[in-house]
Image: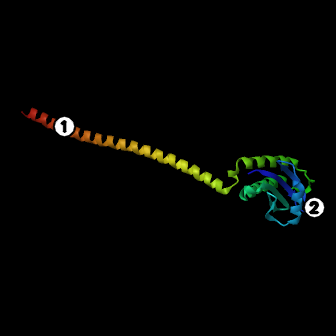
Amino acid sequence: MPLIYAAAARLGTPVSVLAEYAIFAGNWTSVTKDYLSKSANGGRFSYTVDSYVMSFLAEDGYCYVVVTDEAAGRTIPNAFLDRVKDEFFTKYAEKGKAVKELGLSSFGKRLKEMMEHATQFPEEYSKVSSVQKKVDEVKNIMSENIEKVLSRGEKLDLLVDKTDNLMFEADRFVKSGRALRRKMWWNNFK
């Protein structure tokens, strides 16, 4: 599931791509601008172009774009866009209003890192995969706990057996002590 292209753009007339990264060359910037100018209203939207899916997230005067192959689905690109939006908006919300086209190349480097991370660890971007991973972790922990309880149960069984033996021996000791005391009393009595 490779992410092919990602960008952060400022909406308006004209649309300005502020930062971008592509894993291979193409006319990504111009295609992105074309689709952004057609759909300047906010929200999420996607377009399929050839075998690529262009996913957009427009919010607060900025638009974030990711291009993937069709096999990637919708969940991971949308989660990726959410992370890009959060990071861009916290670091560059004010600066992005005044900067020129492609003026935030430092964020382009960050886009590269984020794309590589999303490609290597897609389960972190999918809620279903994330939940499944947590369920597996809980399942493993529960299995370990059950094994520990069972081994403790075996130890408890041994402890119960030893306690029963000890109670039997104590009872026998009391009876033999009583018999010895009576015998000694009779010996002294004679």
Where residue 177 sits in the image (x, y, percent)? 19, 37
Name which quarter of the figure residue 89 lies in.
bottom right
- Name the amino acid, label 1: Ser
Left-right relation of 181 to 38: left
Q: Tell me, yes or no, if residue 57 can be seen here.
A: no
Identify which residue, 56 or 50, lies in the foreground: 50
Q: In the image, which is nearer the foreground, mark 2 or mark 1?
A: 2
N-terminal-most mark, 2 or 1 = 2
* 156 over 63 or under it: above or below: above
Task: Identify the residue position indicated by label 2 in the image.
Answer: 14
Name which quarter of the figure residue 79 lies in.
bottom right
Where residue 178 sits in the image (x, y, percent)? 18, 39
Q: Which mark is residue 73?
A: none
- Identify which residue is drawn at 62% across, 55% down: 131
- Identify which residue is drawn at 90% across, 63% down: 12
Alpha carbon separation for disc pair 2 and 1: 106 Å
Name which quarter of the figure residue 69 lies in.
bottom right
- Name the amino acid, label 2: Pro
Left-right relation of 77 to 190: right
Task: Identify the residue position indicated by label 1 in the image.
Answer: 176
Circle 2 — which element?
Answer: loop
Where residue 9 sits in the image (x, y, percent)? 86, 57
Q: Quadrant of the C terminus?
A: top left
Question: Tell me, what colour scheme is on the image?
Answer: rainbow
Check contact, mark 2 vs mark 1: CB within 8 A.
Answer: no
Circle 1 — which element?
Answer: helix
- Identify which residue is drawn at 79% across, 65% down: 43
Where residue 58 sits in the image (x, y, percent)? 82, 62
Identify which residue, 38 or 171, lies in the foreground: 38
Dot 1: within a 10 Å radius of its alpha carbon, few (fewer than 14), some, or many (20 or more) residues? few
Dot 2: within a 10 Å radius of its alpha carbon, few (fewer than 14), some, or many (20 or more) residues? few
